[in-house]
Amino acid sequence: VVLNLRTGKQRFFRGHNQRVTCLAVRKSLDFGASGQESSGQDQCCCFVWRIADCMEQACLRVEEHRIDAIEWSQDGSQLYVCASSNSDGERSRQTKLYIWNYTTTGRPLVKVLANCDRILGMCAHYSDPTSCAIFGMAHLAFFEWETHLPGSLRLWQPRWGAVGPPRAIHCASYLPESGGYNGQ
């Protein structure tokens, strides 16, 4: 449902045939992306749709059975998708990260195993379209990559010290560099 709060008018995006699991809107407000889970052994997909008229623009298929998180890069050129299969409980899942260059909607540029702990969300860097954070059950990971070198994905995690990571991380944010802080 796309609801205009000022007028109360509603429009519906009807592409999904299973439960919607996540949603992201591009900063320019022209496109939205939404994920779903599949039933049984079917693949699931990430739908990209125009916000103005709720028309489907693409169905980006993934091998897994559930889209866990979606995020647009701040410039709208990259679409990041985390998808998982066959959870063995709520905490642990095998998750893959897909990155689409949304200026050309073909196959994903990058597909890599991202984490075995459940992903709860993603946060794109505020100015770098090739950087994003993934967070969830007992983990926080940052990645960056070169758009012209899809195999250049670099993933790193913070050092938590003796206490270890928190049980769950529900949100993350990049901060602007200032006063010696590195922005992550």
Image (cartoon, rainbow, N blue to C red):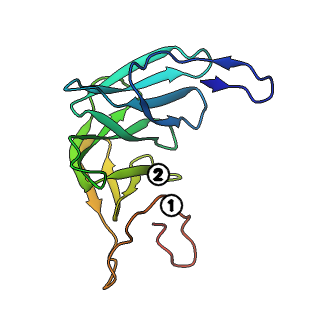
> SS of the residue at dot 2?
strand
Seen at 43% across and 50% down, the residue is: 122
Front-most of 16 and 106? 16
Amino acid identity at mark 2: Cys
Residue 28, quarter of picture: top right
Seen at 58% across and 38% down, the residue is: 27
Residue 131's tag is none
Lower sequence index among marks 1 and 2: 2
Seen at 49% across and 21% down, the residue is: 49
Q: Looking at the picture, how far across and down is residue 77, in whole percent?
A: 44, 35
Q: Which residue is mark 2?
A: 123
Amino acid identity at mark 1: Tyr
Residue 149, quarter of picture: top left
Image position of 7 with respect to 37: above or below? above
Asked if the residues shown at circle 1 and circle 2 are in contact, with their CB atoms under 8 angstroms apart, the answer is yes
Q: Which residue is mark 1?
A: 174
Task: State which mark lies toward you, 1 or 2.
Answer: 2
Q: Is residue 177 left or right of residue 162?
A: right
